[in-house]
Amino acid sequence: MRDNKQAWSKLGIDIATHDVILDVVGAAFGEVYLSQKDRPAKMDYFNAFVAELHGKRIHELMEGQREGRKVVGTFCVFVPEELVIAANAFQVGLCAGAEVGYEAAEQYVPRNTCALIKSAFGFNRAKVCPYIEVSDMIVGENTCDGKKKAYESYAGLVRNLYVMDLPQMKSESGKALLKTEYRRFAAELEKLTGVKITAENLSKGIRIVNAKRKALARLASLRYADPAPISGLDVLLINQISFLDDPERFTAAVNDLCDELEQRIREKKGVMPAGTPRVLISGCPMAVPNWKLPNIIEKSGVVIVGEETCTGERGTRNCVETSASDVDGMIDAIVDRYFRIDCAIFTPNPDRLQHIKEMVKNYRADGVVHYSLRCCQPYTTEAISYEKALEKESIPVLLVETDYSAEDAGQLSTRIEAFKERIAK
Ligand code: BJ8
């Protein structure tokens, strides 16, 4: 019998505060997720994962550590899971999706820092994220200014912070930098785990992560259908879980769900009626349990059919090419894949706008809700020119800037209602 509290105590979790947070997340999950109508039955796997968010998976990671494996915690989709798996380590995304420990966080980062960064500090200071505490190494990355400066203080708060430099331009020298950094990361992983990265284990890592991406791409393509066979809320949840779950088990669960969705499409069974206004969400990532905006959108009778975010297609599209047979060639193929991620930290960043347009077409979206976290310079800045460019092509856009608090929920719902009127067929 698993004893969660014993495991959390071992990790130094503040049990009392953690209990309160789990209660709040559990209640929010019931209200946001379990209240949805006509959910696919195979969502049960993902519901169960949430019920055990800090339980079963943490035990698995700790069990792995007892067998000598290491845990690598991350905050960004630029960290190549293929290398982590090759080094026989676990990769997990870290808690950064709720308003927790802000007062303590503001001792390290300014008040007007985006919610995601503040939350990462808050979870650490409040000692309520077992994924942070179980990590043998945490990877930071030089992406936006907020993150890159924040890691300077974060380094003093966690056991083993490793910072990866990342390019800011899609140039030859930018790509060369990414190659250098992925090789340096591979060497660091070898040092951490004592496992040499070989052609054999790296091709296994590539195969596992490619399979996960293919399953998510399959799921995404099923959302072209009208009526939409699954809600945006559910797909967001699946994407959030993809950062935590065992990749092979997760892939099987997603493929299972896709089988059910294909059947639903044949039967024309949807989560909302055919003809419901459809939107694409584009912008900042939504870390678990940040479900605020999608919940407001779908509760207003608009269905989300795609996510151009790092907890959506930006993070999962494109597989690593598999023709290389040596480690160097495989790392090159990994670089090729990741260098295509069109995060707003790149300048200029025309691929992202192009991708939004393609998604609008493929998913038959009636409009785009652009979501930025307050104080996020890269995404709020791109939002301005993207709105103009999309509206020029008659794609309606709603710009939303928000955070993790519930304060603006009423105002957001009013704006979504008005947007719904605008895009209704
Ligand atoms: S690849 S989007 S996961 S950096 S919201 S912290 S950008 S101020 S999260 Fe990201 Fe990697 Fe890019 Fe994706 Fe800064 Fe903006 Fe905050 Fe952000």
Image (cartoon, grey):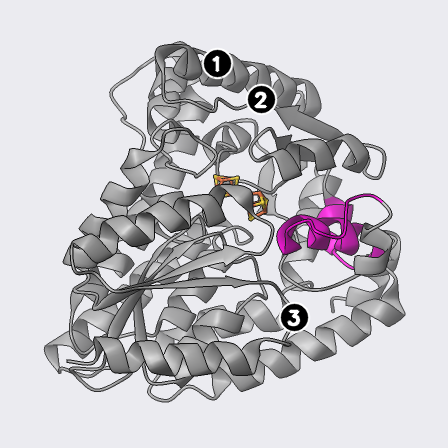
What distance separates the C-alpha of mark 2 from that of mark 3? Answer: 31 Å
Disc nearest the viewer among 2 and 3: 3
Asked if residue 397 lies in the magenta stretch, the reply is no
Q: Say which residue appears at 51% left-offset and 19% top-offset.
A: 182
Asked if residue 109 lies in the magenta stretch, the reply is yes
Label 1 vs 3, first from the N-terminus? 1
Which residue has dot 3 on it?
405
Q: Nearer the viewer, residue 91 or 376?
A: 376
- Looking at the rendering, the stretch of residues picked out in magenta corresponds to 108-134
Helix, strand or loop at label 1? It is: helix
Q: Amino acid at mark 1?
A: Leu
Disc nearest the viewer among 1 and 3: 3
Which residue has dot 1 on it?
177
Q: Amino acid at mark 3?
A: Ser
Q: Residues within 10 Å of mark 1 (few under 14, many from 20)?
A: some
Is residue 66 depicted above or below 95 in this figure? above
